[in-house]
Amino acid sequence: MQPFSFATTAQILCESGSARRLAELCRERGASRVLIVSDPGITRFGLLDGVLPGFAQAGVAVEVFDQVIADPPEPIVLNAVERARALGADLVVGFGGGSSMDVAKLIALLAHPSNSQALKDIYGVGNARGQRLPLIQVPTTAGTGSEVTQIAIITTGETTKMGVVSPLLLPDLALLDAELTLGLPPAVTAATGIDAMVHAIEAYTSKLKKNPLSDLLAREALRLLAANLHEAVHNGQNREARQAMLLGALLAGQAFANAPVAAVHALAYPLGGHFHIPHGLSNALVLPHVLRFNAATAAPLYAELVPLLLGERFQGGSTEQRCTAFIAELAALSERCGLPSRLRDAGVPQAMLPTLASDAMQQQRLLVNNPREVNEADALAIYRAAY
Ligand SMILES: NC(=O)c1ccc[n+]([C@@H]2O[C@H](COP(=O)([O-])OP(=O)(O)OC[C@H]3O[C@@H](n4cnc5c(N)ncnc54)[C@H](O)[C@@H]3O)[C@@H](O)[C@H]2O)c1
Ligand SMILES: [Fe+2]
């Protein structure tokens, strides 16, 4: 067996309705001043309405910073750190999608009284030092798995993103409450759900760090996500399906945090950078085309996953037939969920494809994990197929 290491969030609470106990959970951790980090959509939808009253009852001061925007840029993080310092926050809660949770991670680190590091100095792997404030994550999308990953992704330029990667960013508690996701719109449910499925698939085929634990998690994640995506998209009020999606996304997060994602994400990032296509949709647009490219080496692994994807519809067959069925099912998902399935339908100009291919090559951190080597000409061919 290959040696491996595995790290994850210390505690996971998977219980519908549990967000109403958030204040209590903060107090149990010794908190007296809590900063909740969120985005304007979350407050507008009233998702915090059932959560905030508990803080007065628990005698815990609370402030909400709800200025996070999708693909958060640096100034948002720096403003939020100021707010946390002014409050004297002694615990940070990320409450929202991946964007809010990623910002919360960095606030917990940078607003710790002992920390004097600047954000610009901690990008990359293992550059963050010292201590962070206690950190609770409450995902309101079932997608990124940020509640169990040691990375925060920040937009640093017009079209570029950078990650801070450190075990310090692993939260103390992830709280999965389906009640918060009942009103998640179908398009966001679909895109974030497919993002989570991609995390599971790419972890399972990750070239360097795939290991028995990540495999176990990726398989169960894919089973849960595939079995519940349709119901969550088309009947969003189904609490069971929503809770299963949250758990699936978390398990996929645990898998890819330890067996990193690869070319699907590497080719998706430039789409987010240039055209602000949501992260999950960017992944969905390139997914079947990257898998077809990868099949030359990864077909046996895709064939192993197909029963989990198809459930009772699985019909067996040779490795090649199973691999074909796997990719065909994933290729059909976007349309079934009401998402655009071609780059041209997502507003990407054809003339930009070479730029996208060149940008994707910058994602070597991810490409090294791909089961098949991808060069710039390959990337361009994949974008053309996806066009
Ligand atoms: N840290 C990680 O491991 C990791 C992994 C993948 C992606 N990311 C990052 O996460 C971000 C994407 O996160 P995301 O896809 O969760 O989207 P998001 O956090 O950007 O949110 C998308 C939109 O959904 C809305 N929304 C969220 N929950 C809702 C709910 N329950 N009801 C109604 N509306 C709701 C928000 O208001 C927002 O407008 C990107 O910045 C990406 O880079 C991080
Ligand atoms: Fe992702």
Image: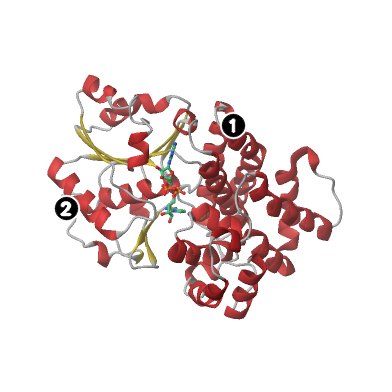
Compared with 9, 318 (above or below) is below
Disc 2: which residue: 114
Q: Is residue 342 above or below residue 15?
A: below
Q: Position of residue 96 (x, y in %)?
A: 39, 41
**Mark 1, residue position:** 241
Image quarter where the N terminus lies is bottom right
What's the amino acid at mark 1?
Answer: Ala
Q: Quadrant of residue 205?
A: bottom right
Q: Quadrant of residue 235?
A: top right
**Residue 1 seen in the current view:** no
Q: Mark 1 CB in 8 Å range of ligand 1?
A: no
The reply to whether the residue tagged 2 has its Cβ within 8 angstroms of ligand 1 is no
Residue 346 or 212: which is nearer the viewer?
Answer: 346
Q: Judge from the rendering whether residue 108 lies leftward or rightward of residue 220; answer left or right.
A: left
Residue at point 31% right, 47% down?
Answer: 104
What is the spatial separation of the Cα atoms under label 1 and label 2, in whole angstroms?
A: 43 Å
Identify the residue at horizontal 17%, vertical 50% (top origin): 82
Q: What is the three-letter code of the residue carrying label 2?
A: Ser
Mark 1 neighbour class, 10 Å CA radius: few under 14, some 14 to 19, many 20 or more: many
In the picture provided, is 101 more to the left or to the right than 119? right
Residue 300 on image: x %, y %: 75, 60
Q: Considering the numbered disc 1 on the image, is that residue within a helix, a strand or a loop? A: helix
Q: Quadrant of residue 137?
A: top left
Mark identifier at residue 95: none
Q: Is residue 371 visible?
A: yes
When the figure is inspected, residue 191 is found, relative to residue 17, above or below; the finding is: below
